[in-house]
Amino acid sequence: NGMIGGGKNDDNNNNNNNKNDFRTNLKKLEQNKALYKSACFEMGMAYEESEDPLESVRFYQLADAPHSAVRVAKENSLDDLLISLAMDSNSTEDVLEIAEYFEAANQIDKSAKLYIKGGELNKGFVSILNFSAYTPEDTLVDLLEICIETLAFCKLPFHHIAEALSKPLISKLSNLMLKNNRPEKAVEFLARIGDFDSALDILDQYDVDINNQLMTILDNILKSAKNSQNN
């Protein structure tokens, strides 16, 4: 019996040692992670000073320093990189800052998309409609399609999306899609803002073909709506 009891004690000691080793390794990993980020930030600054903005942005990203990455990209007019930074960002502040940058540069197609992602839905969609005086309607509708798809990345909670758009604007946007023979996009738009009744009406009236892509989109939207109700 003594031997068995001793074996149990040895097992307990081993378990405790393993746990301590694990905690020690975990602490080292955390310290290494902090050191890694610090080193990347210093590399970002070094490349910024040596006027290599692409490498500077890359290292600022690795350092988890998005504000510095956005600043360098803006100062060096790295527009494609800015779009990528905005679409990958979880910071509404960064997304809207980049949207304002593109709006100031009169790149409305880019700013509208980012305003929508950042939750400024009215501003994004209205800016596209105001753009109609300078662009053919089919190009305008193409831009609106991209903006509708961007609703999937909007930072607003699902149940607040519809509240961010005025009813006349919702009607104008969906009618524009229907007028240009894109009823499936009108359905997607209405579903993304939670107006499922209107979306179903269009499905019936226009005999919209629910292909795999539209079915997947609608399924994901319904899941988001359900999760939003549960929260």
Image (tube, rainbow, N blue to C red):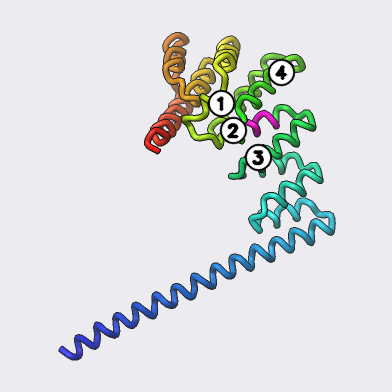
Give neighbour class at mark 4: few <14, some 14-19, many 20+ (Cα, 10 Å).
few
Q: CA distance from mark 2 to mark 3?
A: 9 Å
Dividing the picture into quadrants, the one containing residue 228 is top left
Q: Nearer the viewer, mark 1 or mark 4?
A: 1
Give neighbour class at mark 1: few <14, some 14-19, many 20+ (Cα, 10 Å).
some
Is label 3 in a helix, a strand or a loop? helix
Q: CA distance from mark 3 to mark 1?
A: 17 Å
Is label 2 in a helix, a strand or a loop? loop
Answer whether labels 2 and 1 touch (C-beta < 8 Å): yes
Work out whether residue 154 or residue 54 is closer to the camera in this orientation and state it: 154
Instruction: Determine which residue is flagged by label 1.
Output: 164
Instruction: Determine which residue is flagged by label 4.
Output: 130
Magenta residues, start to end: 111-116
Q: CA distance from mark 4 to mark 3?
A: 21 Å
Work out whether residue 215 or residue 123 is closer to the camera in this orientation and state it: 123
Give neighbour class at mark 2: few <14, some 14-19, many 20+ (Cα, 10 Å).
many
What residue is shown at x 65% (from left), y 24% (from top)?
143
Dot 4 amino acid type: Asn
Q: Which circle's residue, 1 or 4, is located before the other in the chain?
A: 4
Work out whether residue 58 or residue 105 is closer to the camera in this orientation and state it: 105
Examine the structure image and report whether residue 100 is included in the region drawn in magenta: no
Dot 1 amino acid type: Ala
Q: Quadrant of the C terminus?
A: top left
